[in-house]
Amino acid sequence: MNTGILEIDLIKKVLKKKGYVFFENGHYNLNIIGIRSNKKEAGSFDDFISCIYKDANNNWICLYWKATTDAGTYWLAKPMNEKGTALLVPNQYRGVYKIGLFKNRYKALVQSKPVKVYRDKNKDKIQDYDPSTIDEGFFGIQIHKSNPVFQSVINDKWSAGCQVFASAKDFNEFMNLVERSQSIWGDSFTYTLIEEKDFDNV
């Protein structure tokens, strides 16, 4: 979905307020931004992933797609890690992602440097973002799609902490941009995760 310059300016203000970098130089220098909703109950694609960049004609483009930035209900109930299920901590992760294969199936953005996650281990359907549980390392927090063909509505097993697109079509559009960006800027991508509440009083 395309949005206008007002949305771009608003996101830039949020990033500036948090001390994050917003890439403005050159064409297809992608700002990949996850926006986590205020809703804490798991099971739906109620977040967004946005991509903001200048195209070959020097026009600013702002796209955003339905996604989840949280783990699904299945993995919250059955953590893969004894410390608890991973929930990515909002932050700007500079150069953390590169193009790779997700489970040896298809191209996606894969984690190449450490990230921070909250650990949720009480096995309910409510996402717990407790700072005392923060864990840092290589946890396979990838950026990929859910249903391989269509659009998913329920997030049950699709994410164990990854950032996941609801629609295969949207994800393919995103990866086309990523590959175009790679040809210009190299295989290193920054992902910034912010929250819906960050837009309050901006």
Image: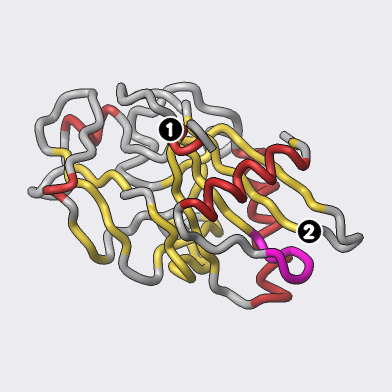
Residue 179 in view (yes/no): no
The secondary element bearing badge 2 is classed as strand
- The residue wearing badge 2 is 54
Note whether residue 34 is visible.
Answer: yes
Magenta residues (range): 24-30
Q: Residues within 10 Å of mark 1 (few under 14, many from 20)?
A: few
Q: Amino acid at mark 1?
A: Lys
* Residue 22 image-quadrant placement: bottom right
Estimate the x, y position of residue 172 in percent, counting from the top left: 66, 47
- Rendered view: 30 above or below 117: below
Whole-number angstrom distance, CA of label 1 to CA of label 2: 27 Å
The residue lying at 77 percent from left, 48 percent from top is 61
- Main SS of the magenta part reads loop
Question: Disc 2 marks which amino acid?
Answer: Lys
Residue position for label 1? 197
Residue at 49% in and 49% down: 144
